Amino acid sequence: MRISLNGLRQSTVGHTAIGLWRHPDSQAHRYRDLSYWVETARILERGGFDALFVADALGPLDVYQGSVDAALRDGIQTPTDDPLLPISAMAAATEHLGFVATVSSTYELPYAFARKMTTLDHLTGGRIGWNIVTSALDSAARNLGLDRQLPHDERYAKAEEFMQVVYKLWEGSWADDAVVRSGDVFADPSRVRPIEHSGTYYQVPGIALSEPGVLRTPVLYQAGTSRVGQAFAGRHAEGVFLSAYLPSMARTLVTGFRAEAAVAGRDPSALKIFAIATVIVAETDAEARAKLADYQRYASVEGALARWSALMHIDLSALDLDKPLEYVETDGIRGMVELFTTLDPDRTWTPRAIAEFVGVGGGGPVIVGSPSTVADELERWAGESGVDGFNIADPVPPVTFRDFVDLAVPELRRRGLVRGAYEGTTLRESLYGPGATRVRDDHPAAAYRFR
């Protein structure tokens, strides 16, 4: 077994850990500084990580109490900066680490977006990836020209056409030998052609504005777990990010994603799946537990409820914090109860209990212990769930990343579970091995290659 690792961040002060920017060791407020991102990239590359995955949201969290106030007080995804812009600086400071940016297909124009990603393909030397999202927040829709968010399935229908356009631009507009740089000719016009796309959502008649990058199509990731989202991932994703608290939950999702890849005519094993995990590691189990307890003192109950309100599209502020949730007759709340009852059926799940539970590591397991304990648990989790690796969160940046690389990675390497050295130079090679620079032949982008 080999476990792949990605670092998980958002360009904000509060993402998976709510309120921990208040911890005296946290440097989360430095998200505005290039030095913060360069330091992060160097730490992760030292640990042999595949990539830094940068999450994003295009609107503030405004469901809780019908206001952005709680999100602002706790710094929950607001304020937040653009995930694409620090990448070239991080790439200049590293040699192997990949960079995966979250960008919404709902609000980008494919022609302009294709050029952005090709530019980063050039500047990173083939170390760029795209986490494809369709956006779920009504606040994003209202601020980006719509009265409200497009319906879920329509967002994915629009995303399907978006993918067709960018595949044509990345794979089919310029031939491999179009750039000749010979005599008086830089590019041979006969080897560059317009894509002539005319569809429901997009009209793109011309040629790709950028010459091809190392990868052409960036490495593609996706994180939707709905029925439509899983089918979309089965067709397009090379990597899938998932959120699950138990290996059994993750196993169900892994099986579903791989089945969708098979339906799409792809090798299911080509879909690399990563589960979010928060790791608190110290020299001993007791020291790690003490570190977690210290972090938990800074977690915000209100902030966690505000985040979950946005995730569920239900205002949890109307509930009694200490009243068991099973008495609330709301479909969304029942789903929440079912999730947490599966985790611990003997515990009384109140809004406060849930908020405290997700305060440090929302979205996945919190693994706490010595390097040996952490390695045991990551190995168990990967074996039981079938995931290919983990998105390691950083609740107290950069302390928790640095602790993981300095303490857990050496033990994982000793067991042969993670790489000791990079074998390629591109992000796709990190997923598939040396020489795997272009999309696989069974990927839908391959059908658009210049013939």
Image: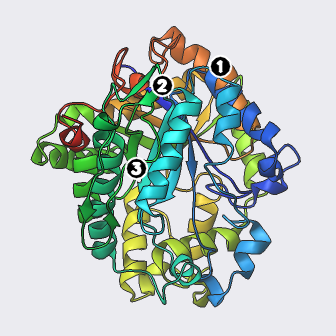
Q: Is residue 238 visible?
A: no
Q: Amino acid at mark 1?
A: Arg
Q: Amino acid at mark 3?
A: Leu
Could you say which disc has been placed on residue 242 in the image? 3
If the image is split into quadrants, where does the C terminus sit? top left
Name the kind of residue labelled 2 in the image. Answer: Asp
Viewer can see residue 82: yes
Residue 72 versus residue 449 in the image, above or below = below
Q: Residue at label 1? A: 46
Q: Secondary structure at mark 3?
A: strand
How many neighbours does mark 1 have within 10 angstroms: few (below 14), some (14-19), or many (20 or more)? some
User: Of marks 3 and 2, which one's residue comes earlier in the chain?
Assistant: 2
Residue at left offset 53%, top offset 32%: 122
* Disc 1 from disc 2: Cα separation: 45 Å
- Check disc 3: other Cα within 10 Å, few if <14, some if 14-19, many if 20+: many
Foreground pick, 256 / 280: 256
User: From the viewer's perspective, is the residue at label 3 or at label 1 nearer?
Assistant: 1
**Front-most of residues 123 and 442:** 123
Q: Nearer the viewer, residue 46 or 59?
A: 59
Per the image, the residue denoted by label 2 is 184
Camera-near label (1 vs 2) is: 2
**Residue 153 quadrant:** bottom left
- Please give left or right for residue 47 compared with residue 216 in the image: right
Q: Secondary structure at mark 2?
A: loop
Residue depicted at 44% across the width and 86% down the height: 327
Q: 3 or 6, which lies in front?
A: 6
**Residue in view at x 45 percent, y 15 percent:** 424
- Vertical comparison of 297 with 51: above or below: below
Residue 266 at x, y = what percent? 16, 38
Q: Secondary structure at mark 1?
A: helix
